[in-house]
C-alpha cells in the first residue's frame, strides 16, 4: 500500500455533527477498500483566496492514509458526489512510504 493525503474543503455552514459525518464517510470509504487511516486533522475555518462555489470561507480537513490505487479511485468517486465537499485534493506522499 502507498501513502496518500487528502485535503477536504467542506462547506463551513455545516454544524459539528455534519462535519464529523463527512469526515467519517471519507475514512469509512478508505477502510472499506482495505486502506488504513494514519491521521485526521481538522484545520478549522479559513478564508478562501477566491470564491469557490459561492463560498468565501471553508472548513479544511487533512487525512493521511495508506491504501491501494483502487481504493483511491473509489475515494475520488465518492468525494466527487458528496455535496458538502466543495473541493478536495488527493496526493501521493512518497516521503511517508
Image: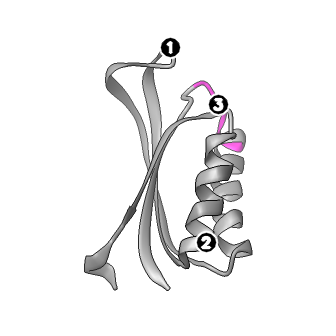
Which secondary structure dominates the residues rendered in magenta? loop
Of badges 2 and 1, nearer the viewer stands 2
* Residue drawn at x 62%, y 59% as measured from the top left: 75
- The secondary structure type at the circle numbered 2 is helix
Q: Earlier in the sequence, mark 2 or mark 1?
A: 1
* Residue drawn at x 65%, y 61% as measured from the top left: 74
Q: What separation in Å lies between label 2 and label 1 (alpha carbons)?
A: 32 Å
Q: Earlier in the sequence, mark 3 or mark 2?
A: 3
In the image, the segment drawn in magenta is 13-17
Residue under circle 1? 54
Q: Quadrant of residue 47?
A: top left
Q: Residue 14 bears which disc, if any?
A: 3
Q: Residues within 10 Å of mark 1 (few under 14, many from 20)?
A: few
Q: Quadrant of the C terminus?
A: bottom left
- Residue 51 % position (x, y): 39, 16
Q: Earlier in the sequence, mark 3 or mark 1?
A: 3
Residue under circle 2? 70
Q: Residues within 10 Å of mark 2 (few under 14, many from 20)?
A: few
* Residue drawn at x 62%, y 47% as measured from the top left: 79
- The secondary structure type at the circle numbered 3 is loop
- Residue 25 % position (x, y): 71, 55
- The secondary structure type at the circle numbered 1 is loop
Whether 34 is among the magenta residues is: no
The residue lying toward the viewer, choosing from 77 and 42, is 77
Q: What separation in Å lies between label 3 and label 2 (alpha carbons)?
A: 30 Å
Circle 3/circle 2 CB separation < 8 Å: no
* Residue drawn at x 62%, y 70% as measured from the top left: 71
Q: Residues within 10 Å of mark 3 (few under 14, many from 20)?
A: few
Amino acid at each position: 500500500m502507498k501513502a496518500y493525503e487528502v485535503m477536504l474543503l467542506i462547506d463551513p455552514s455545516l454544524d459539528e455533527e455534519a462535519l464529523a459525518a463527512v469526515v467519517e464517510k471519507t475514512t469509512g470509504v478508505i477502510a472499506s477498500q482495505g486502506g488504513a487511516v494514519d491521521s485526521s486533522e481538522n484545520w478549522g475555518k479559513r478564508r478562501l483566496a477566491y470564491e469557490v462555489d459561492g463560498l468565501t470561507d471553508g472548513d479544511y480537513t487533512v487525512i493521511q492514509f495508506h491504501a491501494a490505487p483502487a481504493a483511491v479511485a473509489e475515494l475520488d468517486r465518492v468525494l466527487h458526489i458528496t455535496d458538502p465537499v466543495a473541493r478536495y485534493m488527493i496526493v501521493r506522499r512518497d516521503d511517508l512510504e
